[in-house]
Image (cartoon, rainbow, N blue to C red):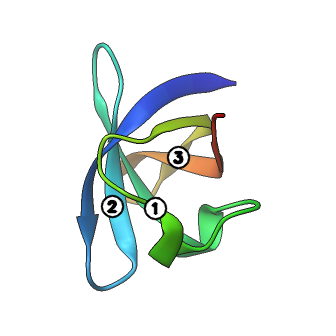
Amino acid sequence: MAQGKIKKLMEKGFGFIATDDKELFFHHSALEGVSFEELSEGQDVEFNQTEGPKGPRAENVKVVG
């Protein structure tokens, strides 16, 4: 699994994860073991990168630690 940090959370239930070289979109339905409301910007996460209709996206997003 890849790792990154929550960069930005949007009120509509999606956000962006920053890695060393890119930013990935994620939707609240891609979260595992945590609700969207429990997330905070700067939090460390693990995820699988997939290709979505608008580019790379994160799936199976889990909080680290």
Q: Nearer the viewer, residue 7 or 27?
A: 7
Q: Which residue is pictured at 46% across the width and 61% down the height?
A: 39
- Quadrant of the drawing holding the C terminus: top right
Q: Under tag 1, what secondary structure? A: loop
Left of 7 or right of it: where is 53?
right
Return the x and y of residue 41 as percentages of the image width and height: 29, 51
Q: Kindly report which numbered mark, 1 or 3, lies closer to the viewer in this rendering.
A: 1
Q: Is residue 35 above or below residue 31?
A: below
Q: Which residue is pictured at 54% across the width and 37% down the height?
A: 45
Q: Which mark is residue 15?
A: 2
Left of 8 or right of it: where is 44?
right
User: Which residue is denoted by mark 1 in the rendering?
Assistant: 39
User: Which residue is denoted by mark 3 in the rendering?
Assistant: 58
Question: Mark 1: which amino acid?
Answer: Leu
Q: Which residue is pictured at 26% across the width and 83% down the height?
A: 11
Q: Is residue 15 above or below residue 36?
A: above
Return the x and y of residue 1 as percentages of the image width and height: 70, 24
Q: Residue furthest right?
A: 33
Query: Which is more N-terminal, label 1 or label 2?
Result: 2
Q: CA distance from mark 2 to mark 1?
A: 10 Å
Return the x and y of residue 55 as percentages of the image width and height: 36, 46
Tags 2 and 1 in contact by the CB under 8 Å rule? yes
Q: Kindly report which numbered mark, 2 or 3, lies closer to the viewer in this rendering.
A: 2
Q: Is residue 36 above or below residue 56?
A: below
Query: Which is more N-terminal, label 3 or label 1?
Result: 1
Question: Mark 2: which amino acid?
Answer: Gly
Q: Residue furthest front?
A: 65
Tags 1 and 3 in contact by the CB under 8 Å rule? no
Q: Under tag 2, what secondary structure? A: strand
Q: Under tag 3, what secondary structure? A: strand
Question: Mark 3: which amino acid?
Answer: Ala
